[in-house]
Amino acid sequence: MIENKNILIGITGGIAAYKACELIRMFKKNNANVKVVVTPNAFEFVTELTLETLSQNQVFLDQFDTNEKKPEHIALCDWADVFVIAPASANTLGKIANGICDNLLTSLACAFQKQIFAAPAMNTGMYENKAVQKNIETLKQSGVKIIEPDTGFLACGTDGKGRLADINEIYNTIKNYFDKKQILKGKKILITAGGTKENIDPVRYIGNYSSGKMGTAIADAAYELGADVTLIKTFPLKRNYKTIDVKTALEMYESVQKEFLSSDYKKDILFMVAAVADYRPELSADLKIKKEENSELNIKLVKNPDILSEICKQKDKSQQVIGFCAESNDVLDYAKTKIQKKGCDYLIANDISKQDTGFSSDYNEVFVLDKKLNITKIDKDTKENIAAKIMEFLYGKN
Ligand code: C5P
């Protein structure tokens, strides 16, 4: 429920700043409390009086203006349940992504430990700029929820992506955040994500193209729904929940056994999203293999354990296991055989032959199979939304 929630709205200096006025009104109309923090440039587009009148609160700009005993950015951090930066300029996004705190808004973003939402708005060229995209990616990685800009007519006279997301969409995103029922509260959930790396020597490995995005999205979704989450991963990522780093399939197997099965750590649910290498080099050289000494190189590969199958054999009846599979053809035929062979409770299958979904993409389209081979399709969407829909499908009826 959004009623009585404390919403801190950050407004940066862009033409879309005027739309933030409507956003403040929507929050106030729905009985949320609003305080507004602006960057100095924001006042080029909206006046202090407008923002003060709409929010019915003092507008915050000056980092060193301490009304209370605490510095302003700490007092506002304590007060706010959520921080919504809309519109978020390329400049401010870049500063936050890089930990720069040169005004009150950026200092707040740096210190804020609850959920930050940022709705970028800028000219298409700026939005598509590689540095800006990298900054947005960094923010996503550190847990900031980006409310994607729309495509359409921009104030600068061009058509393209960069227009502030619709105000209703921004409002609904925040409302949904508060409405989300903690349906997984009390559940311990283990997720694996990313592709394993099988060592050839200290500098080379056999790997695959898995990005770990789907597994991360599943872990984030479970965390938001109140689960006690542990993520075993093969790539760098910082989160507020427990994460464990592994490299190889054998390390992942050992970690899954410990975290899912051992009495000290036992979990209720395992999502085996990782792309585990089926084979590894039989021997991994201790020293770098030199090309000068080998005119050809034969690497004998031996089979890795199938973690999913092994865990399904060893688990308790009360524990649930969800497998994933990526297929490039006859997806459903392979998936039906696979769920029976592996013995998991559900199998989530996706078609990696499609250009715009699957491996490395931000989008996915999946089929959820249960043990009776009932199939439910979840249409193409961002991996974050697909993860939320998978959770809703599996646990929403509880
Ligand atoms: O057989 P396939 O690799 O298509 O199955 C994919 C599913 O099996 C995924 O859930 C993956 O995490 C898991 N898997 C595994 N161990 C392997 C290979 C795959 O747990 N060695």
Image: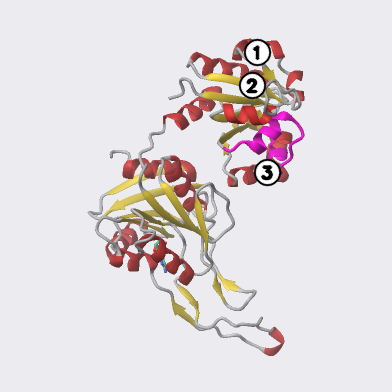
* Whole-number angstrom distance, CA of label 1 to CA of label 3: 31 Å
Residue type indicated by callout 3 = Asn
The answer to which of 272 and 116 lies nearer the viewer is 116
What's the mark number on residue 138? none
Question: Ligand 1: which quarter?
Answer: bottom left
What's the mark number on residue 52? 1
Label 2 neighbour load within 10 Å: few <14, some 14-19, many 20+: many
Residue type indicated by callout 2 = Val
* Whole-number angstrom distance, CA of label 3 to CA of label 2: 24 Å
Quadrant position of the N terminus in the picture: top left
Provide the residue designation for mark 2: 36
Query: What segment is highlighted magenta in the picture?
Result: 93-113
| N-term mark: 1 or 3 | 1
The secondary structure making up most of the magenta span is helix
Q: Is residue 40 above or below residue 213?
A: above
Question: Residue 141: where, in percent of width, then height?
Answer: 59, 47
Q: Are marks 1 and 2 in contact (CB under 8 Å)?
A: yes
Image point (72%, 45%), residue name? 131
Residue type indicated by callout 1 = Glu
Q: Is residue 170 above or below residue 208?
A: above
| N-term mark: 3 or 2 | 2
Image point (35%, 39%), residue name? 183
Q: Left or right: 113 with respect to 66?
A: left
Q: Nearer the viewer, mark 1 or mark 3?
A: 1
Q: Left or right: 114 with respect to 153?
A: left
Provide the residue designation for mark 3: 135
* Whole-number angstrom distance, CA of label 1 to CA of label 2: 8 Å
Colouring style: secondary structure
Q: Nearer the viewer, mark 3 or mark 2?
A: 2
Image point (29%, 56%), residue name? 319
